[in-house]
Image: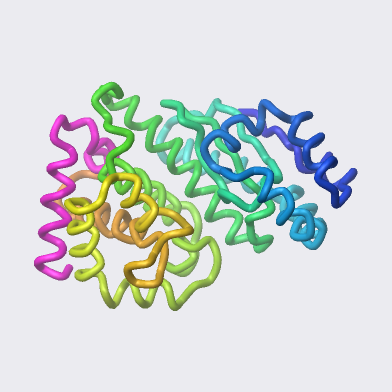
Amino acid sequence: MFIHDTVTDFTDNYLPTIDYLKKYYEKYASHFEEYFRYHCPNVNEKMKMAILKHQEKISALIEIKDKMPKFISEIAMDYEQMYDISFTKDVHLIVGLYGSNAFTYRQIIPEIAFCLEKLSPQDRHLQIIIAHEFGHALHHLLSEKSGVDWSMIDWENPFTWLLQEGIATYFSTKVVSARKDEYFAFEEDLEWITFATNNKQIIIEEFLSDLTSLDARAVFLEWFSINGGKRFGINRLAYFIGYELIQSCLLELAELDVISLWRNVNYQDIIYRQLSEMASKNV
């Protein structure tokens, strides 16, 4: 595993101009290919909006990029010792345009990128988002080890996303001690977790209802995207549903069976039945 730091160059030479941003993204084009392809639409518009934000965050960017390598190494080692695996894929530290905060590449065993302009400089918040993204990679490593047939995974199905986010969140709770709201927001957000906890049944019911009335893209926007949440006025509630799904499954199945649930040909049906039961029992 190699950590690519493009941020030191950014903070050392920053100028609040469009021209500077373009040269930075051109210089590190290989590190931004995935970001601009999948995680940052409307680039020209966002460049204009990001200039002042970047300028205000330079000191925080320096603080964050200095902390990240240590936290990444520690969390990766915790997972490696816990599950007898090794992380070998690269990690990219970048300064984006206030799109995604972090993501795994669209690979079976994925590389990971952290967009530092979107991150809180608090230690615990950085540790949680690192643990979450490495949790995605760990999910794939353990699934590969268990013999999953990757060709049968429907990557554009909301049940797949739910499983991925639920397991990544579950893993993050095993290596970072924090309040429950922080595992979902990567910062303090008691209002978010209070609403989700107090309305779990109706949230799950509405999610299942949307699966029959909306296409996958609309489901993603409403339930998984930071720009969604029109149904309840709160975004990314699918992360909470996913985590609660994993907790429910762990009451009935061994941990590795839950982690590798998508190894089953009918994994989507299994998830649907589990969610339906959770909604009806309000558990």
Magenta span: chief secondary structure:
helix
Magenta range = 256-283
Residue 186, given in percent of the width and then of the height, sits at: 53, 61
Figure label count = 0
Q: How is the image coloured?
A: rainbow
Judged left or right of residue 223, residue 107 is: right
Above/below status of 89 relative to 96: above
Q: Nearer the viewer, residue 258 or 228?
A: 228
Q: Nearer the viewer, residue 14 or 261?
A: 14
Residue 130, given in percent of the width and then of the height, sits at: 55, 48
Q: Quadrant of residue 73?
A: top right
Above/below status of 51 relative to 189: above
Judged left or right of residue 148, residue 170 is: right
The residue depicted at 79 percent of the width and 59 percent of the height is 52
Judged left or right of residue 233, residue 129 is: right
The residue depicted at 26 percent of the width and 36 percent of the height is 260
